Amino acid sequence: MNIYLYGMICISNSYLLEEFPTPDRYSEILESYRFPGGETGTCAAILSALGADVVIDGTHIGGECENFVRDFYSLRGVDTSLLRYDRDMPPLEDHIIISGDIRTPMGSFGKFYSDSYSTGKKHWNMPHESAIIRCDAAAADPYFGEDSELAASLCVKHGKPYVTIDCKHDSFIHRSSAVSVISGEEAVRSYPDISREELFEMFAENTEGLTIITNGSGRFIYGRKGEKPKYFEPYRVNVASTLGAGDSFKAGCVYALASGLDDEKLVSFAAACAAAAISRYPMQLYPPDMEQIQKLMALRK
């Protein structure tokens, strides 16, 4: 199984707190970690742990992080040969504070994009057509505008099915996807006045692929154009941290898509992958394995 991933890779600094901070009060740091993350960075670590051959592409790696990123993915068998390292660029980092199922990310992504567009020097790669030709399935984050659209169009050109996330209902990257996942957060942010059922219909009618609208720990909607929406109740696990839950769901979708699973099995596998992932902290360092995912699915049956 050869997978091509195009999108966001950053350095994540994660802090697990005894209790979530409130103004003027101390909170104890129980654990802290630093690792390559982001929607694509996390997805790569999980897919590799499931046995896929993964090629990762997208964000330039800045500052002094080259060896850190190479070493992290080298140990996991992820191909980083397409990544560009730019020591003149500040490293793209985020800081996430976590307590239970609550988390708050902080970063400089606004500056990352404003610098790219104001100077005309993009801090990410163009998608590599040769890597897309060689893959069995792909995933494309929508965060690089026309370059993300190009990744999608190259997948279409070469007949490669792909998964995308949190894109707009009328975008090319959604219309041409095999699987399009819209998180509950994105639904509220971009479509605040639309019910989830109406939102599902809006997205599903604009693609021949599978549309999934997640809802955190609540049941989510999935289905295709012309169908009544179907519902899935997430697996219940002891939650260590919800950091990367959406990224692990995406990874599960990619793996299931490349495996040729039907819609019901794809959704079940992706949900089990996410549930297994959030039972570990941090999942980027301790990704779920196939045995744990299959056990969850067997218990549901």
Image (cartoon, rainbow, N blue to C red):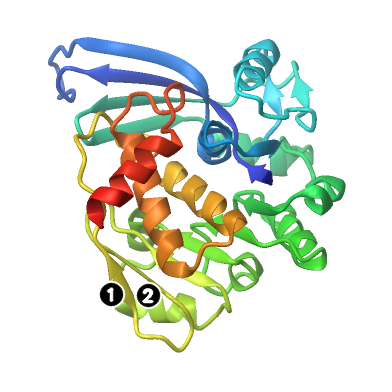
Query: Residue 199's mark?
Result: 2
Residue type, mark 2 in image: Leu
Residue 77 figure quarter: top right
Q: Outermost residue, right direction?
A: 130
Establish if 259 lies above or below 127. Answer: below
Name the residue rendered at 58%, 26% in the picture: 92
Q: Secondary structure at mark 2?
A: helix
Q: Are marks 2 and 1 in contact (CB under 8 Å)?
A: yes
Between 79 and 215, the residue placed more toward the observer is 79
Seen in the image, is 153 located left or right of residue 204? Answer: right
Q: Position of residue 243 (x, y in %)?
A: 35, 34
Quarter of the figure with residue 190? bottom left
Image vertical order of residue 141 relative to residue 201, above or below? above
Query: What residue does disc 1 label?
Result: 195
| Picture coordinates of residue 94, whole percent (x, y) | 47, 26
Label 2: few (<14), some or many (≥20) within 10 Å? Answer: some
